[in-house]
Amino acid sequence: MSATIGKTSLAYSRSWHLVDIGHDERAFGRIATSIATTLMGKHKPIYDPSTDCGDYVVAVGCAYLKTTGDKRTLKKYYSHSTRPGSLKEITMDRMITKYGGAEVLRRAVRGMLPKNRLRDIRLERLKAFEGFGHPYKANLVSFNDPTHPSKTPVTDAIKSELLGPTAP
């Protein structure tokens, strides 16, 4: 049996997912984990670690991140320019006020992606916005709703196609 069965261009096509962080009840790390999984393509049956088969993710409402415990005051981000004495640290709270919640989300997702040549390419497909508006409304296919994980426009269209327009 061939190993390329099912690996068609349709399987590798990229879809767009919307994650509403402001209205999602999950903690920040759980949301970042699901975003990293989607960017890698692990949710697809054709996943291969060496190929780039992930989807686009649009994250809105990043200004309203929900963290647990004292992470906003205790978690620190470090930067170093490789010069002696140039280690800088900034807390999550100051990072959010200075750069916004989108940068905090990008750094969290970047740390969860595999450290290889595909990491920056995958991270470019994450589109994070502070507010709820974004220019990708025409591209969106599925919405990440934790209360109804199987309720997306694609599954709704398939159900209405198979069962008729009166399907719930």
Image (cartoon, helix red, strand yellow):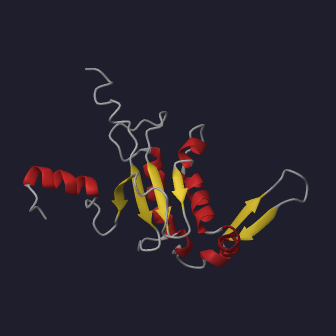
Q: Is residue 124 left or right of residue 139?
A: right
Q: Is residue 122 visible?
A: yes
Left or right of 149, for residue 115: right
The residue sitting at 52% across, 53% down in the picture is 126
Residue that sits furthest to the right in the current view:
84
Please report the residue visible at 66 percent of the width from the left and 75 percent of the height from the top: 93
Percent across and percent down for residue 14 are 40, 42
- Quadrant in the rendering for residue 45: top left
Where does the image place residue 106, in percent across and percent down from the top left? 59, 58
Q: How many marks?
A: 0
Rendering coords of residue 41 (x, y %): 42, 44
- Residue at 61% x, 64% y: name it: 104
Q: Is residue 67 visible?
A: no
Q: Residue at x 54, y 68 (%)?
A: 62
Please state if 114 lies on the left or on the right of 143 as rendered.
right
Image quadrant for the C terminus? Answer: bottom left
Residue 22 position (above or below residue 124): below
Quarter of the view holding residue 160: bottom left
Q: Is residue 120 above or below residue 128?
A: above
Nearest the eye: 140 or 122 = 140
Whether residue 68 is situated above or below residue 117 in the rendered picture: below
**Which residue is situated farthest in the top direction here?**
1
Q: Position of residue 1 (x, y in %)?
A: 25, 20
Taking the image as shown, residue 66 lies to the left or right of residue 120, namely left
